[in-house]
Image (cartoon, helix red, strand yellow):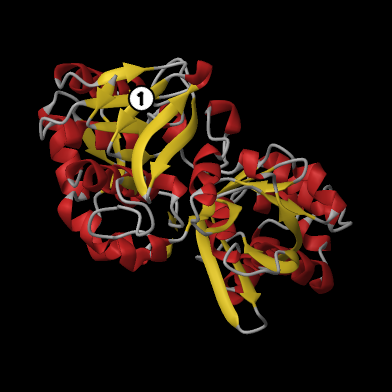
Amino acid sequence: MDKTVVIIGAGPAGIMAAISASEKNKDVLLIDKNNVIGKKLSITGGGRCNITNNCSINEMIQRTLNNGKFLYNSLNMFSNIDLINFIETNGCKLKVEDKGKVFPVSNNSRDVIDLLLKILKRNNVDLKTNCEVQELLIYKNKIKGVRLSHNKIIETDAVVVTTGGLSYPHLGSTGDGYKFAKKLGHNIIRPKPSLVPINIKEKWIKDLMGISLKEIKITSKVSNKKKIFTEGDIIFTHYGISGPAALEFSAYINQYDKINNQKIQLDLLPNYTIEELNHIFQNESRKNGNKLIKSILIKFFPKNFCIKLLNILSINQDLKLAELSKKHRNKVISAIKNLTLTTEGFRSIKEATITSGGISTKEIDSKTMESKLIKGLYFAGEIIDIDALTGGYNLQIAFSTGYVAGYNI
């Protein structure tokens, strides 16, 4: 059985590689070891599919933390606007939400996957699910075929590896592509978790489990000099913090080796200064001195958080505002503006949204996505050492690099 191209991995990069190759009348085989395509795609954006972001290409590159410049060609050849037009032209209406995130109007990732499946069928792509590649076959540094389970061999002159990273292994990302690439001489930049929840050392964090806060600011100094910060929502867990702001923060501190014992500061009300909060407390004490201290906090935070915070600060929640000492008032305001936590590493890569690291971009031609070591071998998507912030950027990278790989075969 001969094929013009074999694509390993039916995630967004593999699907788009199959579509772009088949549109050039290539005979395409798309293989996935799962029983359906787009398994990881189905859970993005909380199951709503944050397919891309409508920012400019320059902004997208700026929000790519590793090797963003490598993407210039891919993003210009198949941009976010191209992707949006492609999806909508084929029958799935999209909408733009907060911070430029693009979702299907239906809020259902299934609609995007069904659309992609329809295009694959229309383009006569041969799709094999529940199928695993065991080995890439090489002769004189050229691709000659792939070996499947049960020793079945498919001859081909081109293979695109789009097997993803190591995050969400239960959805199929188990690092198979790294093994293929390493065996053929490629350098693998150590895979690390990114966009991942953060473990926190302070034991009292468990008392806040399940509580979420809106629009807070996380700040830290890394390497004792550079200050990094993110803003957004967080949720407290039994082990630490999660939610968009925490995940994005992990992507930044992931760039530095020291992720244990890192002091991070949470500003729970970034739109208020210490002076403004002092004024609010003092004003409220004068006007409503008989009200309890938690009554003023409840105006800003969930009730259960206010009670837990006062408990952590060893301040009686039934204390009246008129009875609140200056020392205790400063203690509360200090906690609101500078709640200091100590990191204890990240959660497992299995819990990460994406994998940072992967095949070195130095060994891939950015114009074609072809390996510089093996002729006819291409890479696309998360398997490459490229990762971006949350907000649709990583999916766009997968679609763009996949498109370029398929187009250039």
Question: What x and y, as percent, mark residue 34?
Answer: 48, 20
Label 1 neighbourhood size at 10 Å, few (<14), some (14-19), many (20+)?
some
The residue at the far front in this view is 140
Question: What x and y, as percent, mark residue 166?
Answer: 57, 41
User: Viewed as shown, does residue 356 lie left or right of 208?
Assistant: left
Q: Can residue 328 be seen in this view?
A: yes
Q: Can residue 392 be seen in this view?
A: no
For residue 405, above or below residue 18: below
Question: What x and y, as percent, mark residue 169?
Answer: 59, 32
Q: Quadrant of residue 123?
A: top left
Q: Residue at x 29, y 53 (%)?
A: 369
For residue 335, above or below residue 83: below
For residue 392, above or below residue 219: above
User: Viewed as shown, does residue 187 lie left or right of 302?
Assistant: left
Q: Which residue is drawn at 36% across and 50% down?
A: 393
Q: Residue at x 40, y 66 (%)?
A: 362
Question: What x and y, as percent, mark residue 384?
Answer: 43, 52
Task: Read off the residue under disc 1.
Answer: 154
Front position in the image: 288 or 154? 154
User: Viewed as shown, does residue 210 lie left or right of 119?
Assistant: right
